[in-house]
Amino acid sequence: MHERSLVATILKQVERIAREQRAHRIRSIRLQVGELAGVEPILVQSAFDELKAETISPDCVLMIEHVPLTARCRDCERVVILKDLRFQCPCCHSTSLDIVEGDTVRLASIEIEEESVPE
Ligand SMILES: [Zn+2]
């Protein structure tokens, strides 16, 4: 399954960062999922719930941020949000568009807990 391998890759990446920071726990992971990324957030969530059991932090929380499909119009030069994945500028109706964001899955941030220092 596409979402499952995606989540596995992200978890590996997060665990590597956590190790580098000498963290013993990952509190949360924030992902930005583009509307056109081709993944179902609900499947990402269920794959995460399943796979996190094998990480250093089985109680880690996943937050998914939805990123709308955004493009720059080559004709009127506006940056516009494309609703319902319609490739047409809502201002001038041009179809000459460059995607700015919303077509990828990105690791936005992670929250980790470092080894506690005795007070
Ligand atoms: Zn336009």
Image (cartoon, grey):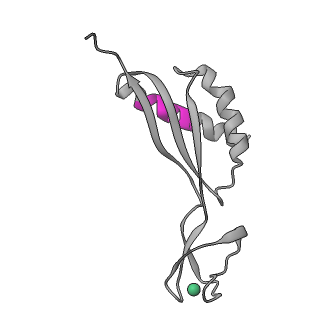
Q: Is residue 47 left or right of residue 73?
A: right
Residue sitting at 58 percent across and 61 percent down? 102
Q: Is residue 73 above or below residue 49?
A: below
Q: Position of residue 96 (x, y in %)?
A: 60, 83
Magenta range: 9-17
- Compared across the picture, whether 61 is left or right of 49 comes to left
Asked which quadrant contains residue 68, the reply is bottom right
Which residue occupies the foreground of this view, 84 or 7? 84
Which residue is depicted at the point 51% across and 33% down? 28
Location of the C terminus by quadrant is top left
Ligand 1 visible in quadrant: bottom right
Q: Main secondary structure of the magenta part?
A: helix
Q: Quadrant of the N terminus?
A: top right
Q: Does residue 49 belong to the magenta stretch?
A: no
For the point 52% across and 31% down, which residue is it? 12
- Outermost residue on the left side: it is 119
Q: Is residue 48 above or below residue 64?
A: above
Q: Position of residue 108 (x, y in %)?
A: 48, 46
Seen from this angle, which residue lies furthest top? Answer: 118
Quarter of the image where one finds residue 71: bottom right
Residue 101 position, x and y percent, is 54, 63
73 to 52, vertically: above or below? below
Where residue 43 appears, as percent x and y from the top left, is 73, 41
Q: Within the magenta stretch, is there residue 13?
A: yes
